[in-house]
Image: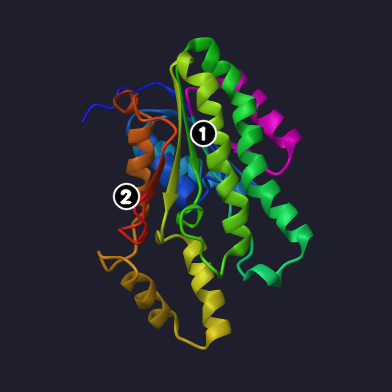
């Protein structure tokens, strides 16, 4: 399937591993030139090298803490200096600590909101003017199944991610006439380092083995398995494409059928 995005410029945050890396690989496979970032300089450089060599496309590694507006501004400046514009923005950030609602202080919730919600808003504000100027853009915000079906053991994530949907739904009313779409991807359990960390945390708290907990997770889905990073990446690539031009303002689950609601 020809996605029509070869040669376009993509920016992906928290891309040194996990879902960000999966998204970067899928876009690179389609010939998108990339700027990828994370807080860890050595790791993001290594990831950029791997992707560039594998897919024969330019990948610019940058250091950015998405909680910092100054870092986001520097990220934008570096991307525009290197590529001149941006067509695709995939917003992503690591998850806040796991735990139940009353395990945390109000200050913990403030930090989680800064990490997940405000980083998304600040990144979009940084790159949106370039999309509007060229009358083409794709914004994909990464959240979690928890925006539809809260998970008791990740209360900070439940709260800090759901506002992204309200922001995107509000935003598209103002930007879509410039041929810019914005959508949300909401993964269930995809086999990443983050899921491994959550399972190890539960292993300590619940006294069950890692394998037992992994099987429990798999049983939550009709497919009876955990998702693959490349399956997530394929969804991001499609939403970034010309073919997805009429998909707009949607929250798209990729969870193997785990979500039990109707809408």
Mark drawn on residue 231? 2
Q: Which is more toward the observer, 106 or 129?
A: 106
* Apparent side of residue 93 relative to residue 103 in the rendered image (left or right): left
Q: Secondary structure at mark 1?
A: helix
Q: Read off the magenta span.
A: 61-88
Dot 2: element: helix
Q: Quadrant of the N terminus?
A: top left
86 in magenta:
yes
Image height check: is 193 above or below 45? below
At 62% from the left and 71% from the top, the residue drawn is 100
Q: Residue drawn 35% across and 77% down?
A: 215
- Between residues 159 and 83, which one lies in front from this camera angle? 159
Residue 13 appears in the rendering = no
Q: Is residue 146 above or below residue 125?
A: below
Q: Identify the residue position indicated by label 1 in the image.
A: 169
Q: Residue furthest bottom?
A: 207
């Amino acid at each position: 399937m020809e996605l029509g995005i070869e040669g376009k410029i993509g920016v992906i945050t928290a891309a040194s591993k996990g879902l960000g890396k999966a998204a970067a690989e899928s876009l690179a496979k389609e010939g998108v030139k990339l700027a990828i970032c994370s807080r860890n300089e050595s790791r993001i450089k290594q990831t950029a090298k791997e992707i560039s060599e594998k897919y024969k496309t330019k990948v610019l590694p940058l250091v950015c803490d998405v909680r910092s507006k100054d870092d986001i501004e520097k990220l934008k400046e570096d991307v525009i200096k290197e590529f001149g514009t941006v067509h695709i923005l995939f917003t992503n950030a690591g998850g806040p600590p796991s735990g139940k609602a009353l395990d945390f202080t109000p200050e913990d919730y403030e930090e989680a909101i800064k990490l997940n919600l405000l980083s998304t808003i600040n990144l979009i504000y940084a790159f949106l003017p370039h999309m509007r100027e060229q009358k083409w853009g794709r914004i994909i915000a990464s959240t979690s199944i928890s925006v539809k079906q809260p998970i008791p053991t990740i209360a900070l994530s439940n709260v800090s991610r759901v506002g992204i949907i309200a922001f995107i739904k509000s935003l598209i009313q103002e930007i879509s006439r410039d041929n810019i779409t914005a959508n949300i991807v909401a993964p269930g359990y995809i086999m990443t380092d983050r899921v491994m960390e959550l399972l190890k945390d539960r292993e300590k708290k619940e006294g069950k083995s890692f394998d037992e907990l992994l099987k429990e997770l798999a049983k939550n889905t009709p497919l009876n398995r955990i998702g693959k990073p490349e399956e997530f990446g394929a969804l991001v690539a499609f939403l970034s494409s010309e073919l997805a031009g009429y998909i707009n303002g949607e929250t798209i689950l990729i969870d193997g059928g785990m979500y039990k609601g109707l809408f």
